Amino acid sequence: MKNLKALIVGDFDYNIEKDTLFGGTHREIILNAVKEYHYPVIFDFPAGHIRDNRALIFGKEITIEVNETVSKIWH
């Protein structure tokens, strides 16, 4: 994980915030796992376990802009 430039986490249709089976919400668990690194973590990307499941092409270079109010991803 140390060689990442950013981490993109997909979205979920079900209420995952209530699922604390592993000791926290998915956001808490992920942020705790990467807390020593200094890259942006983008949550709720329209991919994953949802109807509007957009494709992520593994290995493709993309540009990511992240600030306090918005995240943008393009190639």
Image (cartoon, rainbow, N blue to C red):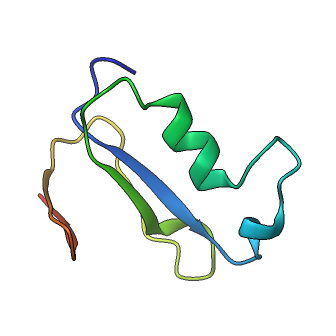
Residue 21 screen position, x and y as percent: 89, 48
Question: How many numbered dots are placed on residues in this image?
Answer: 0
Specify the quadrant of the image occupied by residue 36.
top left
Relative to 38, say whether 75 is above or below.
below
Residue 24 vertical position relative to residue 19 in the rendered view, above or below: above
Which quadrant does the N terminus fall into?
top left
Position of the C terminus, as image quadrant, is: bottom left
Which of the 4 image quadrants contains residue 7? Answer: top left
Residue 38 or residue 8, whichever sits in front: 38
**Residue plotted at (22% across, 42% down):** 60
Residue drawn at 25 percent across, 37 percent down: 39
State the residue in front, 67 or 11. Answer: 67
Residue reaching furthest to the bottom:
51
Residue at 42% across, 31% down: 35
Quadrant assignment, res 18? bottom right
Look at 21% across and 76% down and name the residue there: 69
Where residue 13 appears, as percent x and y from the top left, is 69, 78
50 shown above or below 38: below
Q: Position of residue 45 (x, y in %)?
A: 42, 67
Outermost residue toward the right in this view: 21
Q: Is residue 37 left or right of residue 35?
A: left
Left or right of residue 72, residue 13 in this image = right
Q: Position of residue 16 (x, y in %)?
A: 74, 66
